[in-house]
Image: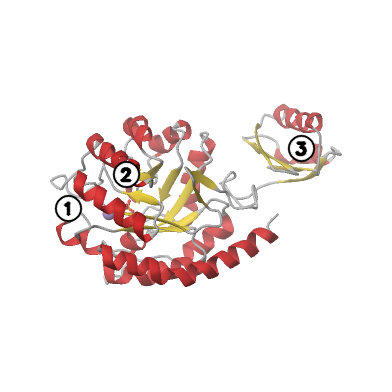
């Protein structure tokens, strides 16, 4: 249930409503807006009786039953987009945020070069995997903690924030020490033990859509993280598996628009894993801006031909800078419509 308090309800009135909800056996989570407090009631109980009782309280504006099984991440729970601050960068705000870098952290030279190229072209966040989910156990598995230290060096050198993947609940504490954003990869979208662990990690999460997952399942996974105490979740469409073989995955570009309707969480697109081909990345990046994505996660490597992983889909520095330049007029339009949206979504 979601209970919307009347404008300017007092703290006592809010406390009274919370107490009534708890009497019915529900747990209470509230979001305090500038003018209005919205209370979420979760759990199992007599919904009808509870709703009737709450609606009879004068300080309650509206009490509604939520049909979607995800509550905290739904647009019904919060109509304005959630803004997630990562250092001085805000994802979900009025800047289109580009996260770029190699698939894997390979060496000090490679990640420092990548960071400089990313920063120069206007990216705000550096990506790079230190723990890599590889299909073959014989493939490069990542530099692990050494890779995290190199990312930290690159952050100090450039001021970029860093995003890197965590694959296991065992490594959440370690990766949280270094990363500004923890990436949960497609293969782990439904690793529930991992998702629960992210609740208390103190870092924003980038949750990638599983390659065979529905949008609803993605939202349910985000709900796990939020319900366990971490509301800072960014969603990422990265392509799904279909019968099509022309691209590595099939980019469900519509998912960005669908998610923007269903959830207040920021949504970004990964055009690299979605296509598997560097030549297709700039076109898809433009589409992401046009459809209202909050940013991009792009693979870029100083020397893609030498990349240990995902070289074929990684942009080289020149193509990356060109893409960033070409995106500018689209991002200008994006900003205009974003400002118009925020003005109406109060
Ligand atoms: C990655 O970002 O390098 C990655 C492994 O992505 P995904 O989990 O989407 O396959
Ligand atoms: Mn990759």
- Mark 1 crowdedness (10 Å alpha carbons): few <14, some 14-19, many ≥20: some
Mark 2 and mark 3 lie on one chain; the one further toward the N terminus is: 3
Foreground mark, 1 or 3? 1
Q: CA distance from mark 2 to mark 1?
A: 23 Å
Residue at left 49%, top 58%? 294
Mark 1 and mark 3 lie on one chain; the one further toward the N terminus is: 3
Q: Are marks 2 and 1 in contact (CB under 8 Å)?
A: no
Which x, y percent locates residue 164? 33, 44
Q: Is residue 110 above or below residue 174?
A: below
State the residue in front, 292 or 225: 292
Q: Secondary structure at mark 1?
A: loop
Q: Which residue is mark 3?
A: 49
Labelled disc at residue 308: 1
Q: Image quarter for residue 194?
A: top left
Which x, y percent locates residue 253? 44, 66
Which x, y percent locates residue 13? 81, 32
Q: Is residue 333 visible?
A: yes
Q: Quadrant of the C terminus?
A: bottom right
Q: Is mark 3 within 8 Å of ligand 1?
A: no
- Mark 2 crowdedness (10 Å alpha carbons): few <14, some 14-19, many ≥20: few
Q: CA distance from mark 2 to mark 3?
A: 59 Å
State the residue in front, 73 or 324: 324
Q: Are marks 1 and 3 in contact (CB under 8 Å)?
A: no
Q: Is residue 104 visible?
A: no
Q: Quadrant of the N terminus?
A: top right
Residue at left 29%, top 68%? 319
Is 56 left or right of 339, judged from the image as shown? right
Q: Is residue 173 above or below residue 333?
A: above
State the residue in front, 345 or 62: 345
Q: Which residue is mark 2?
A: 157
Labelled disc at residue 192: none
């Amino acid at each position: 249930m979601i209970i919307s308090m009347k404008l300017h309800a007092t703290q006592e009135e809010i406390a009274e409503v919370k107490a009534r909800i708890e009497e019915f056996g529900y747990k209470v989570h509230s979001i305090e807006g500038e003018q209005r407090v919205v209370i979420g009631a979760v759990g199992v109980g007599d919904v009808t009786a509870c709703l009737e009782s709450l609606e009879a309280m004068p300080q309650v504006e509206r009490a509604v039953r939520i049909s979607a099984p995800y509550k905290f991440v739904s647009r019904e729970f919060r109509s304005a987009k959630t803004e997630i601050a990562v250092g001085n960068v805000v994802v979900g705000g009025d800047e289109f945020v580009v996260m770029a870098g190699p698939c894997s952290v390979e060496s000090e030279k490679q990640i420092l070069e990548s960071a400089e190229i990313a920063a120069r072209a206007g990216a705000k966040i550096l990506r790079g995997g230190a723990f890599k989910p590889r299909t073959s156990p014989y493939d490069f598995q990542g530099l692990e903690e050494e890779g995290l230290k190199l990312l930290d060096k690159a952050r100090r050198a450039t001021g970029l924030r860093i995003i890197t993947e965590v694959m296991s609940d065992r490594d959440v504490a370690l990766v949280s020490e270094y990363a500004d954003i923890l990436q949960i990869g497609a293969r782990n979208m439904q690793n529930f033990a991992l998702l629960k662990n992210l609740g208390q990690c103190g870092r924003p999460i980038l949750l990638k859509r599983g390659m065979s997952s529905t949008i609803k399942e993605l939202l349910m996974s985000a709900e796990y993280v939020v319900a366990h105490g971490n509301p800072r979740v960014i969603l990422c469409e990265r392509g799904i598996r279909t019968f099509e073989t022309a691209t590595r995955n099939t980019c469900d570009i519509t998912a960005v628009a669908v998610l923007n309707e269903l959830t207040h969480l920021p949504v970004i697109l990964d055009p690299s894993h979605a296509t598997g081909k560097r030549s297709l990345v700039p076109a898809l990046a433009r589409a992401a801006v046009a459809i209202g994505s909050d940013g991009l996660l792009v693979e870029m490597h100083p020397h893609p031909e030498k990349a240990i992983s995902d070289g074929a889909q990684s942009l080289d520095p020149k193509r990356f800078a060109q893409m960033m330049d070409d995106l500018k007029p689209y991002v200008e339009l994006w900003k205009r419509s974003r400002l118009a949206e925020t003005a109406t979504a109060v």
